Image: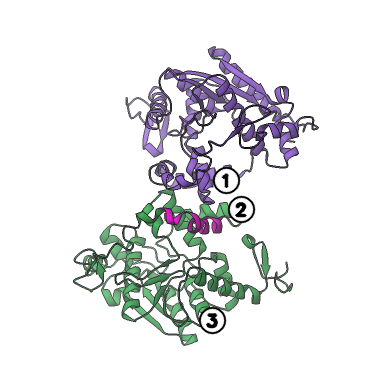
Chain colours: A purple, B green
Amino acid sequence: MKCRVCREPAVIDIRRHNANFCSEHFLRLCRDQVAKAIKDFDMVQPGDRLLVAVSGGKDSLAVWDILRELGYEADGLYIGLGIGGYSDESGRMTKAFAEQRGWPLQVIDLREDFDYDVPTAAKVTKRVPCSACGLSKRHLFDQAAVDGGYDAVVTGHNLDDEAAVLFGNTLRWQTEYLARQLPVLPARNGFPRKVKPLVRLGEREMAAYCVLRGIDYIVEECPMAAGNKHLGYKDALNTIEAQSPGSKQAFYFGFLDRAVARFADGASDGSDDSGLGTCRSCGSPSSGEICAFCVLVERSAGAQPVVLTVKGSS
Amino acid sequence: MKCRVCREPAVIDIRRHNANFCSEHFLRLCRDQVAKAIKDFDMVQPGDRLLVAVSGGKDSLAVWDILRELGYEADGLYIGLGIGGYSDESGRMTKAFAEQRGWPLQVIDLREDFDYDVPTAAKVTKRVPCSACGLSKRHLFDQAAVDGGYDAVVTGHNLDDEAAVLFGNTLRWQTEYLARQLPVLPARNGFPRKVKPLVRLGEREMAAYCVLRGIDYIVEECPMAAGNKHLGYKDALNTIEAQSPGSKQAFYFGFLDRAVARFADGASDGSDDSGLGTCRSCGSPSSGEICAFCVLVERSAGAQPVVLTVKGSS
């Protein structure tokens, strides 16, 4: 197995590219793929200030690392979700990563700063934890980006993530979600621009990137996500991909090339939400008097906290 | 486990309907679902003469049976594809089924009537057998329907089949195929109307229907289809369906409700093929001077036949 570029011994094969790479040329490939995604989708400009949503997992640490390597001014924001030992460990890793490199990292802790956590919010709202978690993260990343004067929020969604979300949205033909499933969401009405520079790279590549760069990341999946539908969609696509390498890439980029525009009329919360007001409590853009985040905080704060084990199970 | 309708002991559970049925009410459900599909999609009218494409499998024998039960004048057409013991057995079963009931069955044998068979055509054309098989069947069913003055060709495609084809077309965003994936294709330019009355019923239901009606069908899958992508898509959807019953139905009918019209511009061979000529050899509608079927016959006839074992493998 030889590197496609230099013919030296390879350390990784990428079946959908039908190619192998040595460490040096694999890392270059990752940077090139991020640069290409940024250019193809006009994600950000040189000189932009970027806020990276970091979780301590391979994807967010890798995208932060690659953006810095490419010369971008990229700071991190970590949110402590209060998911038992899983959150303790991911917080520890994220802080160590930033400290070692001397990169600015802002930390928000749901329990310390807002008197709730994801398991408690899930219990109070009687919905799946991923719902309260996603809402909290979106709100706090948006707000921090706006308050900090950042040009964009960067997330570490990779090709496997995007293909799985697309599969879920397609299985139910959720036309509003399909209309908005793009690697860039422009800034609008008080919401910051959001970009996904890893859409050309898969999960396995991001794990390899971290290993080869000596990045210590939290390997465990979030214990609250276990068994959710998203992971089922990933499994199904992995089976397809194993049979026909390149299927995920063809699915996601084929959607962007030939389908997403056909759903544009469904993007009801796209450019046409100019009627949004601001949340009376926090000042964020909101369709109601109080935004969904502040409602969640209000309902959860003061509730008896759900205690998780060190493994993150309740 | 009790029948939803009569509370007598049930023989089958249908998870996507969250209901169980006794034999009598399950058979009625199957007929009702076919009647509903015919009505919802305006497939055929009372008094229409229908030509059922029968393979000897559960779906085609069941749809023929149900259409007759519903009072339609439905005749059968069986094509002997020359796939070793698999074809011998399916032909025997189809003929026995029709004979027992005294229903008209027309039989075409590729080897006897056109001097080729599917395995030989696949070898000669160097393409997968399913390609030569599909081309042959489409052509011969179309021609027989037009020659016999039938109002529509009926195929036994069930919900599982249609969902799997849709999944394959969606994975590659094949917009032309998506535009045409409908349960009814109207007659046009010399092609007969084509209808799929089983789209509201799954594979497992059709097997149960045959068992309960005492219909003897060929259980084996076609040996030449083993390992093809279509079966991989079925497996993937079955995994999803097991986790969330109703997923396949939501996928297929959601597509018809909210997506297919968005691909209408891609139907290049839809209503706009008025420029079609006729095949110089057989007189069928054709974009070329000689239609693809006659080209296949010409290339395959006279070639050394591929000999299959009794199991259908080469």
Same subunit, labels 2 and 3: the answer reads yes
| Disc assigned to residue A232 | 1
Label 1 – label 2 distance at C-alpha: 10 Å
Is residue B253 shown in magenta?
yes
| Total numbered circles | 3
Residue A30 point in image, percent of width and height: 42, 27
The residue segment tinted magenta is B247-262
Same subunit, labels 1 and 2: the answer reads no
Q: Which residue is mark 3?
A: B69
Label 2 SS: loop
Q: Which residue is mark 2?
A: B244
Residue B92 point in image, percent of width and height: 43, 78
- Residue type at mark 1 is Gly
Check if mark 1's residue and mark 2's residue have beta carbons within 8 Å. Answer: yes
Pointer 2 chain: B
Residue A39 point in image, percent of width and height: 37, 28
Left or right side of A133 for A3: left
Q: What secondary structure prevails in the magenta region? A: helix
Label 2 – label 3 distance at C-alpha: 33 Å
Examine the rendered structure and indicate whether residue B206 appears above or below residue A212: below
- Residue type at mark 2 is Ser
Which of the two discs, 2 and 3, labels the residue nearer the N terminus?
A: 3
Examine the rendered structure and indicate whether residue A130 appears above or below residue B208: above
Query: Camera-side residue: B153 or A151?
Result: A151
Q: Which residue is pictured at 56% across the width and 16% down the height?
A: A98
- Residue type at mark 3 is Glu
Quadrant in which residue B25 is drawn: bottom right
